[in-house]
Image (cartoon, grey):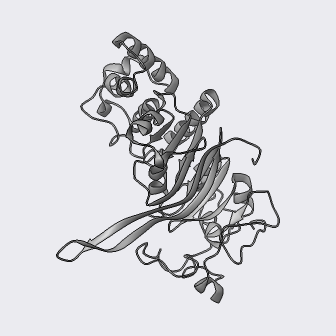
Amino acid sequence: MENREVLLSVRNLVKKFPVKGGILGREVASVKAVQDVSFDIYRGETLGLVGESGCGKSTLGRCILRLIEPTSGEVLFKGKNILELDSGEMRALRRNMQIVFQDPFASLNPRMTIEEILGEPLIIHKLANTKEERRKIIYELLDLVGLRRESISRYPHEFSGGQRQRICIARALAVKPEFLVCDEPVSALDVSIQAQIVNLMQDLQKELKLTYLFIAHDLKVVEHISNRVAVMYLGKIAEMASAEELYARPAHPYTRALLSAIPIPDPTYKKERVILQGDVPSPIHPPTGCFFHPRCPVAKEQCRTEAPALRSSAVGSDGHRAACHYASFEVNP
């Protein structure tokens, strides 16, 4: 991986949301949604981003695209810090960076036909001069995502959930991007439809040479589609490794707990569950030291006072890192 081209780099990214109170509505605290996150995404790969609801996954994805303005840090796309770009430069860059949202119905305008929805980005970025040129590109997009060309005159409510997500993917691909943030694109769909959409995204990645940041909470889906996986907890990266390495040799206690909760479709298979105590702490007042220590089964005094760095393992594959003082890089039982 180290010899491959880095398409996107996130450096020390922070996002805080103000909490206002009192008669004057002054800022009294802040929600620390993303805290000092750094990682690279290589061209052509899929980086899976997993974690519990509220851990900051979607906020991180939106900050990378500047749909939400980060508080501090850097986002380097092909070496250029996009947080320093003005609105005109950012609009031009959006051709290369697109997003597929979680809810395929809420992200489509119910008053627009599929032709209008898919034609809108072509008009904004001036990729087609006439209606005939736009329609030709729209037909190609519908073919690409497996929808019938007759769909062009229909409205979003006339499609199933899986078909609507295909439309959202086609809209994202209309401007021929290099990088896609996929924000839980299959979590609102039935399991059988999830497999179809994931397979479609893998086929499109190979055909169009796309790079994905794939955000999800379903660990089996992430294992299937990702080259590498990053695990988030309370706004920070807890562990990062190749998908094969992470699932076979989880080092962080939180990752071990997540993997132990994956259901196995075999009633004779016995797997030891790791039960976490308590609830996720508030991002307004996170714990001192390691954020995970109040729920960690192996926490010691050092964990309560000293925040662990995201360090590399002494064994296992290169690039396997865990933010734990007592990370155990052993084969998962």
Image quadrant in which you'd find residue 51? bottom right
- Residue located 82% across and 65% down the image: 315
- Residue extending farthest top: 132
Residues 191 and 92: in front is 92
> Vertically, is 93 above or below 140?
below
Please give left or right for residue 314 compared with residue 210 in the image: right
Q: Nearer the viewer, residue 164 or 311?
A: 311
Q: Is residue 153 left or right of residue 319?
A: left
Residue 143 at least partly seen: yes
| Residue nearest the viewer, comparing 81 with 258 | 81
Q: Which quarter of the rendered picture does the C terminus lie within?
A: bottom right
Q: Residue at x 60, y 79 (%)?
A: 296
Looking at the image, is 325 positioned above or below residue 126?
below
Residue 222 position within the rendered picture, expressed as x and y whole percent measured from the top left: 60, 50
Q: Residue furthest left?
A: 23
Can you give x and y, in whole percent of width and height, for residue 49 in the image? 57, 54
Where's residue 245, x and y in %? 74, 57
**View extreme (bottom): residue:** 301
Residue 300 at least partly seen: no
Left or right placement of residue 285 versus residue 44 in this view: left
Residue under the point 35% across and 12% down: 130
Label total for image: 0
Q: In front here: 233 or 219?
A: 233
- The x, y position of residue 217, in whole percent, is 52, 56
